[in-house]
Image (tube, rainbow, N blue to C red):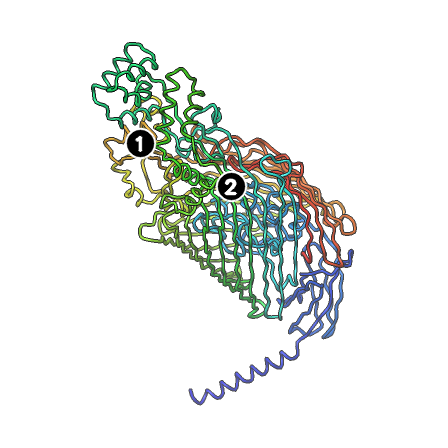
């Protein structure tokens, strides 16, 4: 071995020197690329040596420098989306190539990855997919890239606040979508504790988004749990491709003619710098800050609540003693007046002689005032006047089933409407070789926003950071990332209101005072409204007024005290760690394309008992999964078949296997028919598993067996909320229906889809689909209650009063499957080289839903979008006009349920591109007709937002 070592060292030396000699003699091509029409320099244009992987991009000035081992002569291909591809012959080393590209608007040629995890033309995608390019984002009328998704076929948006918007496809809309995955550069950007994406609060800045791909429908076979109804992939800009400094400033105005708030400004500033330091190394950094006065929610509609269920009823604070306003908080504290009287009588601990005497006086037929005078005349019976209103009211049954609620506070007095969002992201990129790249990236966001769940949650100074290390190659990648969540100063608005009320006066004292005066006034002949007004004025005397020092102190105490200690603040610092990889084996298997991948995910839930049940400290949950995809072109350019399968396992549930089978048929050039059968699933999310949260209406608890032990549901049963309501109204014990606590199972779905995408005469693109889905083991919550004492022997008696009952809501799987179907069609027509007319129409609906079954489908039956646009209509002038309309929808939610009327909005923008200066000026607005609307029950009303922006080097 020692004799061979010198020979080995000599060989290595020769190889190194040979490489150095080679490295000293590369072929170098330089040049500049321009737009043939406008003569502007074109950035991010691809220049590739044909037949190799050697290539580069133009910089922000349109210049490029390509270094390759190829020796002339050879051909380079110059290309970019939106331009006609051009081949140029290279004859000599150090050749200078100055070329012009002709704008081209070829339809259906965009390359997408989401549909099969492999690059393919969108025209040939085996499933329904939409793509939004950087050009489309730049020309969109909305003020940020996330708004561009609202213009796509099959998409619905739920707006909880200006910065918290939730994307949904194929139904089940809501604030926080548990059935749609959102991946940013391959990272799941859902909050670990919430298990859904917090919209655009974290993630990429507007200037750093390269494209978005939306995969509608089932996608679990490739993307795992959560992909029941779709997956959204958002990709950032590569600093090797997108170079230079970019900046954009938007200034706007909102709340025009809004009685809820005076007109106020909107600010948004973003910067980005990408630098290719060498052919090996590049970096980028970007930041964005947005500030606005948020949209207001002020629905005063009266709700009739039963645990987490609700429905609209008539009445106002002035006409209904038990008024519960949608966006009024603190009035959830409610009690039956008859129960109040019973409690007061029991607490008085009257001797038998006293009750006999009052029964006697009532039996004589004397009026209430006469009995008061009789009792007052004798010093020994005068104290009985303190209980007489309750006692006589109860005996003469003046209450019936009437309830009363505490006076609440409006949302504007409690929620932080100072919407702001600061995001920063960056990355270091190193090319190991011409085809393999390593990168270290990070995205961090901090903001204040509002989210609608079982409550209106004020997410104040909420932050999430995501950090990723990745090595990728056209044939494989390995990736590791972490998500770090911090709830900051976030709190629950209703709990804060209850905390303020109770800091001023305990519920028992308030209801005691209210009940006394209400009974007294009613027995004296007052109407219900008159009695309520008198009782409320008496009980509310000295109540903390919003803005007062006393109110501010009580509010601060509640919002800075954790929920686990009786306050309203969350104290969550949960995190996620994920490792994943993928390999394309197609080059080794000649007869069929084979793709395989795997992932491991680990949650670390740490809410300090403010969200989750954590008796022994933070909770750890692990998941792992693996997938394989087989793809074969059976008939060249005519028939392509794909089969995919994925297995996933969550440590708390049995493993799930989900298959997908697709076929793409191309009967003629530029005409493709797609067929697919897919299954999808979702494990009960982290909150479904471990939540233990006190809300105004009930205690939300998880689905794991530990909760059955914790709350002893087996030994002390609970009863359904609807049967409890019947029992309280009728007094019939037989009406009570027991509810059984069971460990929940994963929700599953199978879907069939038929679609068509085609191009006619190179100017007309049509895309259409129809799907049918069947959901099984639907994950929902069941509202239940039992006696508050915990004693099974007295539980039923205690249920007669909300004061002596405890409400719960636990996770269940529905017994019968639910079916859904939907359809959609989109049209795009090119006029000349720059104009486009677009439109789409789509609908979704549930079938087979049983009466009283709550599905939270929340989807309008019909929606459509119409648009007319041009990025360069005349010498740098561009425009985009989009009208959107949706049908009315019956909204179901744990916060509230009611009807959302049909509405339409008009968005528009006009832009001018100073090509030589690389400056883009834009004036636009959303909902420019300023007709206020809301797209979810209990959410804010949205008016017009008008803005002007100026951007430099916005590519």
Secondary structure at badge 2 equals: strand
Dot 2, crowdedness within 10 Å: few (<14), some or many (≥20)?
some
Q: Is residue 25 above or below residue 506?
A: below
| Residue where numbered disc 2 is placed | 752
Residue 838 shown left or right of residue 898 in the figure: right
Tell me what residue is drawn at x 47 percent, y 23 percent: 319
Q: Residue, x 55% and y 55% (percent of image)?
A: 423
Quadrant location of residue 429? bottom right
| Inter-mark Cα distance, 2 to 1 | 50 Å
Q: Which quadrant of the rendered structure holds the C terminus?
A: bottom right
Residue 518, disc: none
Q: Secondary structure at mark 1?
A: helix
Crowding near the residue tagged with mark 1, few <14, some 14–19, many ≥20 C-alpha atoms within 10 Å: some
* Number of the label disc, if any, that sits on residue 804: 1
Q: Which of the two discs, 2 and 1, labels the residue nearer the N terminus?
A: 2
Residue 709 is situated, as x and y percent measured from the top left of the image, at: 28, 43
Instruction: Quadrant for the N terminus, please.
Output: bottom left
- Mark 2 vs mark 1: give the one in front: 1
């Amino acid at each position: 071995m020692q004799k061979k070592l010198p020979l080995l060292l000599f060989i290595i030396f020769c190889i190194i020197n040979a490489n150095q000699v080679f490295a000293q003699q590369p072929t170098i091509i330089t040049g500049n690329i321009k737009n043939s029409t406008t003569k502007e320099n074109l950035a991010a244009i691809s220049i590739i040596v044909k037949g190799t992987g050697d290539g580069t991009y133009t910089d922000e000035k349109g210049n490029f420098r390509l270094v390759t081992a190829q020796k002339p002569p050879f051909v380079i291909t110059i290309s970019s989306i939106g331009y006609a591809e051009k081949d140029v012959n290279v004859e000599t080393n150090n050749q200078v190539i100055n070329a012009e590209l002709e704008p081209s608007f070829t339809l259906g040629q965009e390359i997408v990855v989401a549909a099969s995890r492999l690059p393919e033309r969108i025209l040939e995608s085996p499933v329904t997919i939409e793509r939004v390019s950087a050009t489309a984002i730049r020309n969109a009328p909305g003020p940020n890239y996330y708004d561009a998704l609202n213009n796509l076929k099959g998409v619905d948006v739920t707006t909880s606040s200006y910065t918290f918007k939730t994307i949904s496809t194929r139904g089940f809309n809501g604030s926080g979508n548990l059935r749609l995955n959102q991946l940013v550069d391959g990272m799941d950007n859902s909050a670990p504790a919430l298990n859904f994406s917090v919209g655009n609060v974290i993630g990429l800045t507007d200037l750093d988004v390269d494209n978005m791909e939306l995969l509608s429908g089932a996608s679990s076979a490739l993307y795992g749990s959560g992909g029941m109804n779709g997956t959204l992939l958002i990709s950032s800009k590569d600093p090797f491709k997108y170079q230079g400094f970019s900046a954009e400033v938007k200034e706007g105005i909102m709340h025009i003619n809004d009685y809820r708030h005076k007109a106020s400004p909107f600010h948004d500033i973003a910067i980005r710098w990408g630098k290719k330091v060498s052919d090996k190394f590049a970096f980028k950094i970007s930041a964005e800050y947005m500030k606005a006065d948020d949209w207001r929610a002020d629905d005063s509609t009266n709700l009739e609540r039963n645990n987490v269920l609700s429905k609209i009823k008539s009445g106002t604070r002035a006409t209904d003693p038990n008024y519960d306003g949608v966006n009024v908080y603190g009035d959830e504290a409610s009690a039956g007046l008859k129960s109040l009287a019973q409690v007061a009588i029991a607490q008085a601990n009257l001797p038998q002689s006293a009750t006999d005497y009052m029964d006697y006086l009532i039996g004589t037929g004397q009026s209430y005032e006469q009995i008061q005078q009789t009792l007052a005349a004798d010093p020994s019976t005068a104290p009985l006047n303190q209980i007489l209103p309750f006692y006589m009211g109860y005996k003469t049954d003046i209450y019936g089933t009437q309830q009363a609620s505490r006076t609440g506070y409006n949302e504007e007095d409690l929620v932080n409407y100072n919407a702001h969002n600061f995001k920063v992201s960056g990355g270091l990129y190193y090319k190991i070789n011409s085809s393999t790249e390593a990168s270290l990236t990070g995205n961090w966001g901090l903001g204040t926003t509002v989210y609608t769940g079982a409550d209106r949650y004020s997410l104040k100074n909420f932050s999430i950071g995501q950090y990723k290390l990745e090595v990728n190659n056209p044939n494989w990648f390995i990736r590791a990332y972490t998500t770090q969540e911090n709830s900051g100063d976030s709190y629950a608005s209703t709990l804060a209101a209850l905390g303020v009320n109770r800091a001023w006066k305990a519920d028992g004292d308030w209801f005691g005072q209210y009940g006394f005066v209400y009974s007294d006034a009613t027995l004296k002949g007052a109407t219900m409204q008159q009695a309520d007004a008198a009782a409320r004025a008496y009980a509310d005397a000295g109540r903390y007024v919003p803005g007062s020092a006393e109110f501010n102190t009580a509010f601060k105490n509640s919002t800075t005290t954790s929920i686990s200690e009786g306050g309203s603040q969350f104290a969550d610092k949960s995190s996620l760690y994920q490792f994943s990889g993928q390999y394309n084996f197609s080059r080794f298997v000649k007869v069929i394309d084979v793709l395989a991948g795997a992932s491991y995910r680990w949650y670390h839930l740490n809410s300090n008992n403010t969200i989750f049940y954590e008796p022994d400290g933070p909770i750890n949950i692990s998941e792992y999964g693996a997938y394989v995809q087989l793809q074969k072109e059976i008939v060249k350019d005519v028939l392509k078949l794909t089969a995919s399968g994925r297995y996933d396992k969550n440590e708390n549930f049995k493993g799930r296997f989900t298959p997908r089978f697709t076929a793409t048929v191309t009967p003629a050039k530029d005409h493709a028919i797609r067929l697919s059968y897919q299954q999808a699933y979702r494990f009960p999310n982290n909150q479904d598993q471990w939540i233990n949260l006190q809300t105004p209406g009930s205690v939300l608890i998880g689905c794991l067996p530990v909760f059955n032990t914790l709350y002893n549901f087996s030994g002390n049963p609970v009863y359904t909320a609807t049967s409890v309501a019947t029992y309280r109204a009728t007094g019939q014990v037989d009406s009570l229906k027991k509810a059984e606590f069971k460990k929940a199972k994963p929700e599953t779905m199978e879907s069939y889809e038929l679609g068509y995408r085609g191009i006619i005469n190179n100017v007309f693109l049509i895309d259409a689909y129809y799907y049918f889905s069947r959901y099984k083991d639907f994950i929902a919550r069941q509202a239940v209650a039992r006696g508050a004492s915990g004693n099974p022997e007295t539980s039923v008696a205690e249920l007669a009063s909300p004061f002596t009952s405890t409400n719960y809501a636990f996770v269940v799987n529905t017994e019968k499957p639910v079916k859904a179907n939907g359809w959609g069609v989109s049209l795009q027509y090119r006029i000349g080289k720059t104009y486009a007319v677009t439109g789409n129409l789509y609908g979704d609906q549930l079938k087979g839903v049983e009466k009283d079954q709550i599905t939270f489908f929340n989807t309008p039956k019909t929606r459509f979008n119409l648009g007319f646009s041009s990025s360069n209509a005349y010498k740098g002038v561009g425009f985009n006009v989009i009208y959107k309309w949706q049908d009315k929808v019956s909204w179901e939610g744990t916060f509230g349920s009611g009807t959302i009327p049909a509405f339409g909005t008009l968005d528009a923008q006009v832009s001018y591109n100073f090509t030589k200066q690389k400056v883009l000026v834009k004036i636009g607005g959303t909902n420019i007709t300023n007709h206020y609307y809301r797209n979810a029950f209990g959410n804010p009303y949205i008016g017009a937002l008008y803005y002007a922006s100026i951007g430099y080097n916005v590519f």
